[in-house]
Structure formats: C-alpha cells, structure tokens
Amino acid sequence: MSLERVTLFDARSSLFFFFGIIALAFISLSFEYYQYREFKTFEDREIEAKVINHYVKTKNDKTYSVLKLRFKGKTLYTLGNKNLKNLRGRTLLLRIWTQKIDFLDYIKGFYIYSYILHVKPELAKSERLSRYIASQHKESLLQELYGALFSATPVGLDLREKLSASGTAHLLAISGFHLGVLTSLILLLLTLPYRFFQERYFPYRHRRRDLFIVTALLMLGYLLFLGWVPSLLRAFVMMIIGYILYERHMKVISMQTLAITTLFLLALWPSLLFSLGFWLSISGVFYIFLFLKYFDTLSAWKMGLGIACWVYLMMLPLSLYLFESFSLVHPLSIVWSLLFFPFYIGSLLLHVIGFGGVFDGILLAMFDKIESRNVSISLSVLLLHVSISLLAIVSKRALGILLFLAISIVVFAIYQVA
C-alpha cells in the first residue's frame, strides 16, 4: 500500500505564498525601474551588446539589416546598412539614443537608434557551436535547423514557414522536451559509474539526490551557455521545483506546480510576460497536465501516444492563430513527436563525432514535399478554446467539449488545404 502524495498548500500557506509572490514582484520591478533610470541617465551613451540575430529585411522599397541584441538581459533591436557582414555572435560597441524609450519598452524589448563604433573579433561560444554544427551540412536550411535544435540559433523566414506548415516548430524550440531528453541521457550515463563508486567508497550518500544535483548543474550550465532561453528557463525552474516537491512527498504533476512555476518566474523576471516562447511552453505543459489529470491510469505506451495526440489537438488553435500556416502533412507532427527522442539523441551523437549530415537527404526530401497554405482562426475562436481549457480543469464535461472543438478545428484546417 503506497501513501498518497500531499498537496503543497493549505489555506494559510496559500496566503503566505500569494503575498510572497507580490513582494518578489515588487522587488523585481523596483530593480528593473532602477536599471531603467540608470539606462536613461544620458540621452546618448555607449553600450556593449551581443548580436543574437542578424537578418536583412525589405519594407517600403527599402532594404536594411535588422540586428537583435542582448544587453544586460534585455532584448534590443536596431537597424543597419544592408551590406553589413553577418554579425551574429559578435559583441558590438554602440552609441545609442535613449530619449524615446519608456519603462514598458525597457521591460519587453525595444527598437533603438544606434551607431556601431566597434565590432569585437571574438565569437560567442554559442555561435562557435552553431558554426561547428553548420560545417557538417551543405544546405543553409539544414544549417539553420540543427543550429536551432542544439544552440537555439534563430531561424530564417523560409525555414520558419516550413516548420509552421509541418507542425514541427515546437520540436526545434529548445524547451522542456529537450531538457527531458538531455537529463535522461545524463542520468543514463552517470548512474552506473556513480553506483560503482558509491558501493565502494560512499554508500551513505543519497544516490538520487546527488545525481539530480549534478544533472541540474549541467543543465544550468547549458541554460547559461544558450543565454536564458525563456522556454528552457521555464523547464529548468519547473524541474527544480518538481524535485523539491518530490523530495517532500508532495504532488508534482499538478496544475498547482505549473501555477507556482509561472508566478515565480513572472515575479522574478517580469519581461517573461511579453515572451511568446515562454507562454507557448507554459501552454504545452498545461495541456499535458490536463491530460494526466483525467487519464493517469493508462499504460505507458497508451500514455505516450495519448499525450502526443492530445497536445497536438490542443496546441493547434494557438498555432493557427499565431502562425496562420497549415499543410496536409501537419497532423504527422504527432508521429514526429514520438520519433523525436531517438532522432535527437542520434543527431546529437553524430554531430559530436562529425557525421551530423547523415539524415540530410531524408530531411530535405521531407521539406520539399511541404506545400503550406494560409489557414487561420479568429481571436474569438481562440478565446473560446482557452476558456473551455481552463474550465476543463474542474469539469470533465468541459473536457469533452474541448476535445470536440479541437477536432473540429483540425477538420476545418484540413478542409481549407485539401
């Protein structure tokens, strides 16, 4: 007979948590405002910023470079000459003008007028990894694909459209899916050596706890290496919170855990409120937990297949509203999700030994067959989907209505492109 895991909060502790989150949010916003005032001390100033992405854009018959920059954890955008060489991964010394930036802009990211004073020759470590990966592929499309998969490199418009049309964009956006694969691989590699040494030299140690600490430190290093990707940050913090709850015999897989993670992250990093990747990551976990709430007694293989199908159906309305792209192969993303684990591990190992191009022919053939069409849903339909989703937390009848609505949207999308 197993003991049932207890929930985290009673009425009193919920109140303490609520006020604790408010206090943390107040401290974070106060610090943000202090930094904003420092940023605005002078109308023009010099800063060092890292180039996260660099692409050429044409608008109103004008062609120019767009630079996405990272400065003290903030996202900035600036424009440059169209003939600028690729600066991604470089650190720039810029003269900027700050008079038009308000506090909300400062938190969520903003365009800024600038002049490049100097380009440092050193490449960021993440860019070196991206270029090493790219060197194993001839096609630029696949260079971008694997760069996004392993080093969170932004993708171009062509690849982004193909990923949206095929329903595989979520597989490239580094998040909890990738964190789960990597932690599983690390634990697999460390468990046997640790057990060998533990049995001989330190049998008193807590094996599970030690392995988790090592894994968490490695994942923290990966997170810092990639530059605090919002979806990966969400997954990492949720992993830490989940383990703490598990150690205290509290329920881990619950909407309460997701709510704690979300509120804590928003209180600590208010800029996440404006991050699309963060909210899509939260949505994916929400629907997984919603499925497990009602179908947690299924066998392992039924659980895996059920989650893949369920998350696809539930996330499709968000995808159609945001990206407005669909194709007849889009539903096959369920299959790609199931095959992702062996593909990710295999590709990772092949890139480590320098043979990352093994699957290039297959991937190019798959992308060539994708013919996307513009398919979208209205904001009212999306809001209806979200409202019923929240109601389904407490109502199984709402869950049935939600499933019917999601299937109807799939049929609508297929009809539009058939």
Image (cartoon, rainbow, N blue to C red):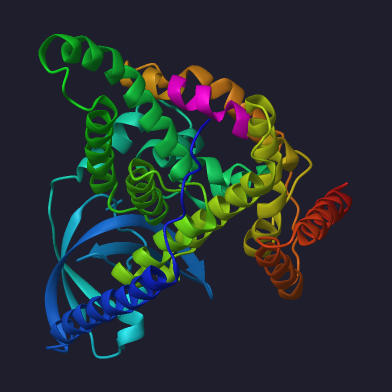
Q: Is residue 222 visible?
A: yes
Q: To which quarter of the image does residue 243 belong?
A: top left
Above or below for 380 versus 345:
below
The quadrant holding residue 146 is: top left
Q: Nearer the viewer, residue 338 or 148?
A: 338
Relative to residue 156, is residue 350 drawn left or right? left
Rendered location of residue 273, percent (x, y): 42, 71
Residue visible at 48% across and 31% down in the picture: 139
Q: Quick check: is 345 in the magenta stretch?
A: yes
Where does the image place residue 91, in percent across and percent down from the top left? 17, 56
- Give the camera-side residue of 46 and 39: 39
In the image, residue 164 above or below residue 149: below
Residue 258 drawn at (x, y percent): 47, 57
- Nearest the viewer among 397 and 235 is 397
> Is 398 situated left or right of 87 in this image?
right
Identified at 74% across, 58% down, the residue is 374
Q: How far across and down, in percent of the image, does residue 129 sit?
A: 28, 35
| Numbered range of the magenta stretch | 337-346
Relative to 66, is 87 on the left or the right? left
Quick check: can you spot residue 161?
no
